[in-house]
Amino acid sequence: MFEADLGWCTYYQPSCSRVWPSVRRPESFSRMIEQGQADAIMLSHGLIVIAGVEDDPLYRQLRANPRQHGYEPVTLPNGNVLLLKR
């Protein structure tokens, strides 16, 4: 799971491997997703505070229409959206 909050894998069943964004060497969100090869993405407040993520075209597309990119969205009670690769 690609996530920036450092703990969502604890709640994910079955257990998952974490893929975290690089904050030392900022990269585009698109590049981070390509390199991480995650089968799930947690769209959370912790992710959008990373410089450049909120303005990244792929991030915007995933927020607007995740199914177009092969992800099934699951909206959590706290407002985060978990995207599961189909």
Image: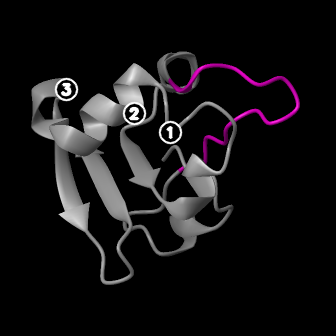
Viewer-closest of 75 and 35: 75
Label 3 vs 2, first from the N-terminus: 2
Residue ID for mark 2: 59
Mark 2 closeness class: few <14, some 14–19, many ≥20 residues within 10 Å = some
Q: Element under label 2?
A: helix
Q: Are marks 1 and 2 in contact (CB under 8 Å)?
A: yes
Q: Which quadrant of the figure contains the C terminus?
A: top left
Is the C-beta separation of discs 3 and 1 under 8 Å?
Answer: no
The Cα–Cα distance between marks 1 and 2, rounded to whole angstroms, is: 6 Å
Residue 26: x, y in percent? 76, 25
Q: Taking 70 as reference, is 25 left or right?
A: right
Residue closest to the far front: 55
Q: CA distance from mark 3 to mark 1?
A: 17 Å
* Magenta segment includes 28: yes
* Side (left or right) of 46 relative to 85: right
Q: In terms of image quadrants, where is residue 52?
A: top right
Residue 36 appears at what percent x and percent y? 55, 27
Q: Is residue 85 visible?
A: no
**As rendered, which of 45 and 82 lies closer to the eye?**
45
Q: Is residue 72 above or below residue 5?
A: above
Report x, y in % for residue 7.
Answer: 63, 67
Marker disc for residue 69: 3
- How far apart marks 3 and 2 lie (CA) works out to 11 Å
- The amino acid beneath tag 2 is Tyr
> Is residue 19 in view from this perspective?
yes
Mark 3 nearby-residue class (10 Å; few <14, some 14–19, many ≥20): few
| Magenta span of residues | 17-29
Disc nearest the viewer among 1 and 2: 1
> Residue 5 appears at what percent x and percent y?
64, 62
Task: Answer with mark 3 or mark 1, whichever residue precedes in sequence.
Answer: 1
**Which residue is disc 1 drawn over?**
54
